[in-house]
Structures are given as structure tokens and as C-alpha cells.
Image (cartoon, rainbow, N blue to C red):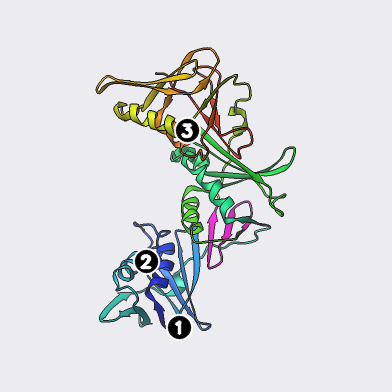
């Protein structure tokens, strides 16, 4: 195999594929990236961790077609440190690959292409397209609520499903048991028969990185066990989480009768200030609601106390409620407008937070005792 490629092009491709490769691997081939020089003048890069696979094709001048696998992180670090604007020559023979750029020359050991595992996709019967911007919105407004608790593995991803309401919609939801995020978008053509699927956290993270470089629409293909995202130059394929996502609709409150309207930015800054002295473990902040004002307070046995009054539009009965300040700030961070509605019931009931009743995103936050 022999090919020449511009450093910037190779670096961008390698940055996408190497982040799929785990730092610690018991199977040596999984530490490698597959490089295939194709006679049509393209270099194919591929990496996998057996659950997630990325396949990217970039332009290159190919002198001799062939394929080899190379340690992914090492090659990425080499290319990253090469001079800007340099041409990188890759030539492989007899179990070695030589990387030449200007006066720099590196030789790395390789493993044969035949040992490289591929995720067998099988039949992916459901296919539809989503605008890249819509997919970004779905991810950005839900991924902070994905659970990291391995025992509840079925919460370690975003639940994507279609539902028939007054109009057919596509919904994405994520929860860790303390908070819930849900986004609703119009159902795309072709998605009507899709099963409800849970997209794993790692796939969500890698997809979000790739979306920054894509305009237009993304092709989605899926079955009950796998999903594929076609992003033009790159194709991301992932196994889905094999589990049942809980019926989250039961925790979305519909009868919360106390309405608080706020400016999310100034409220979040207030929460951030008083939570400076909150203990790392609970991060609890108390909200005392009175007519048109909220008093935020934190009391910590080790650190002392803090309080701040912030304005708000509130006309219901005064009461007190506590929240995890970090969870509250994560939700407020997603609000793009200059007003947010907080629908409350009592100090023990789930609280509904949304921009307004037309907003595609809604959030539910469980209170805590303070």
C-alpha cells in the first residue's frame, strides 16, 4: 500500500476515528485503525470497539492500493505533530508502515487487515432523513440527562421513538431518575414503522462531534438492534441498548397548578452563586417562593450559609422547595429564550420546566429535601 495525503485532511479523518478506539484494549487489533488505500483516489479509515464503528472516506493520491491496520492513537499523535501544510506519505510492506512528511520519518508495526472485526449490520429496514440541525437539537437538549449508572444500563442512552398524538411526532427522551429531558420534532417521512430504540451514550457523543462538520440532512437506518448514521464522508454504525426504556410519560406532571416565570440567565447565575458553598455530595439549594420573588439559599454545616433574592413572576401560595443545583443549572442551560416557565405542585412532587407550551423541549426535575 502506498498513498500521499495532505496532513490537514488526514488529521481531520483520524481525529474522528481514533476517538472511537478505547485507550485500554485486551484485544490488540481493537487499538488499531484500518487504513485502506483505494484505486479511485481515496483513503478509507475505520475504527471499532465492537459496539460502535466509524467508517470515513477521504481524498488521497493512491500509488498502490492496499489495506493495513495501524495503532490509532499513535498515528493520530504523529500526524498531529507534523508541520502544517505538509504532504504525508504512507507506505506499508512486510508488517510495517512508514509515515514520511518533510524531514520526519516514522515506522510503526501493523496488524493484518484480515484480523480487523466489522460490525455486521444485517438488515436495517427503517430508513429516513433528519436535518443535521434537528439532530443537534435533539442531542444537545437531552444528553445531559443520560444516566451513567451501569446497573440501570437501559437508561445509558437516548430513547428515540415515534408516537401518534394529534399529529405524528418523533420524540427523544433521556433520564437518570432525578431529571428527565424530552424533545419533540415532526415525524420524518419513513419513520412511521420505526421501533423505539435506545442509542448508547458513546454513540451520541461521537455523533455530536461529527455533526459540527455536516450541513444538510443525515440519513438514519435502523433495526431493533443496530442504527446507522450516514453523514456523507463518514458512516457511524452502533449497536443499540438491548433493554426496555421505562414509561417516562407517567412522571411528566399535568396538574402542577403553581406557575413561576423567570429570566433563566439571571436565575441560573443566582443559583450558581449561592451553590458555591453547597457540599459536593448534595449540591442542595432551597427556593423560598413568595409573591414575585424567590429567595435562594444554601446552608452547609462545613462551609456556612448563602442567600440571594432573585426576581420572578409568581402569584400562587408561598412555599419552599429544594433542588440539586447542578441538575437545575443543566436544565436552565438548555433554555434559549429570555423566559422560562416552572410549573410546581408541592415540595415533594416532580416539577415541570419548559420555555412555554409551544416549546419542543420539556424537562422534569425531582425535588430534594433541604
| Badge 1 density bin: few <14, some 14–19, many ≥20, Cα 10 Å | some
Q: In this view, does 278 lie to the left or right of 235?
A: left
Q: In this view, does 200 lie above or below 76?
A: above
- Which of the two residues, 70 or 316, is positioned nearer the viewer here? 316
Q: Is residue 168 visible?
A: yes
Q: Is residue 106 magenta?
A: no
Which circle's residue, 2 or 3, is located before the other in the chain? 2
The residue wearing badge 1 is 61
Across and down, in percent, residue 56 comes to 49, 68
Per the rendering, the mark at residue 11 is: none
From the viewer's perspective, tell me whether residue 275 is left or right of residue 185.
Answer: left
Label 1 residue SS = strand
Residue position for label 3:
264
Q: Nearer the viewer, mark 2 or mark 3?
A: 3
Q: How far apart are marks 2 and 3 (CA)?
A: 43 Å
- Observer-side mark, 2 or 1, equals 1
Query: In terms of sequence position, does the residue under pointer 2 or pointer 1 come before the other?
Result: 1
Mark in the foreground, 1 or 3:
3
Q: Quadrant of residue 171?
A: top right
Residue 183, percent from left and from top: 59, 41
Asked if the residues shown at circle 1 and circle 3 are in contact, with their CB atoms under 8 angstroms apart, the answer is: no
**Left or right of 150, for residue 239:** right
In this orientation, which residue lies closer to the viewer: 142 or 54?
A: 142
> For the residue carrying disc 2, how many other residues have a C-alpha within 10 Å: few (<14), some (14-19), or many (20+)?
many
Badge 2 element: helix
Q: What stretch is highlighted in magenta?
A: 218-239
The quarter of the rendered structure image containing the N terminus is bottom left
- Residue 72 circle label: 2
Q: Is mark 3 on a helix, strand or loop?
A: helix
Amino acid at each position: 500500500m502506498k498513498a500521499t495525503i495532505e496532513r490537514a485532511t488526514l488529521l481531520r479523518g483520524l481525529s474522528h476515528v481514533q476517538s472511537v478506539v478505547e485507550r485500554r484494549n485486551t484485544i490488540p487489533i481493537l487499538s488499531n485503525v484500518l487504513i485502506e488505500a483505494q484505486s479511485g483516489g481515496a483513503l478509507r479509515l475505520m475504527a471499532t470497539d465492537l459496539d460502535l464503528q466509524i467508517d470515513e472516506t477521504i481524498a488521497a493520491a493512491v500509488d498502490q492500493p492496499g489495506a493495513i491496520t495501524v495503532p490509532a492513537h499513535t498515528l493520530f499523535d504523529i500526524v498531529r505533530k507534523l508541520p502544517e501544510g505538509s504532504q504525508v506519505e504512507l507506505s506499508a510492506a512486510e508488517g510495517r508502515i512508514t509515515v514520511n512528511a518533510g524531514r520526519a520519518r516514522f515506522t510503526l508495526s501493523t496488524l493484518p487487515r484480515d484480523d480487523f472485526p466489522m460490525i455486521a449490520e444485517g438488515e436495517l429496514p427503517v430508513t429516513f432523513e433528519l436535518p443535521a440541525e434537528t439532530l443537534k437539537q435533539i442531542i444537545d437538549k437531552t444528553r445531559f440527562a443520560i444516566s451513567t449508572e451501569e446497573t440501570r444500563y437501559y437508561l445509558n442512552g437516548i430513547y428515540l421513538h415515534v408516537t401518534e398524538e394529534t399529529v405524528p411526532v418523533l420524540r427523544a427522551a433521556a433520564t437518570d431518575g432525578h431529571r428527565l429531558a424530552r424533545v419533540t420534532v415532526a415525524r420524518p417521512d419513513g419513520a412511521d414503522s420505526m421501533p423505539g430504540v435506545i442509542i448508547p451514550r458513546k454513540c451520541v457523543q461521537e455523533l455530536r462531534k461529527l455533526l459540527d462538520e455536516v450541513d444538510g440532512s443525515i440519513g438514519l437506518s435502523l433495526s431493533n438492534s443496530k442504527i446507522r448514521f450516514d453523514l456523507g464522508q463518514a458512516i457511524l454504525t452502533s449497536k443499540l441498548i438491548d433493554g426496555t426504556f421505562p414509561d417516562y410519560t407517567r412522571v411528566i406532571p399535568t396538574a402542577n397548578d403553581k406557575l413561576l416565570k423567570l429570566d433563566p440567565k439571571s436565575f441560573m447565575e443566582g443559583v450558581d452563586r449561592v451553590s458555591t458553598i453547597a457540599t459536593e455530595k448534595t449540591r442542595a439549594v432551597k427556593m423560598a417562593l413568595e409573591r414575585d420573588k424567590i429567595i435562594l439559599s444554601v446552608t452547609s454545616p462545613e462551609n456556612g450559609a448563602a442567600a440571594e433574592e432573585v426576581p420572578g413572576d409568581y402569584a400562587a401560595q408561598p412555599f419552599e422547595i429544594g433542588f440539586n443545583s447542578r441538575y437545575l443549572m443543566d436544565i436552565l442551560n438548555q433554555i434559549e429564550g429570555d423566559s422560562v416557565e416552572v410549573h410546581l405542585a408541592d415540595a415533594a412532587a416532580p416539577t415541570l420546566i419548559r420555555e412555554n407550551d409551544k416549546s419542543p423541549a420539556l424537562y422534569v426535575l425531582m425535588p430534594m429535601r433541604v
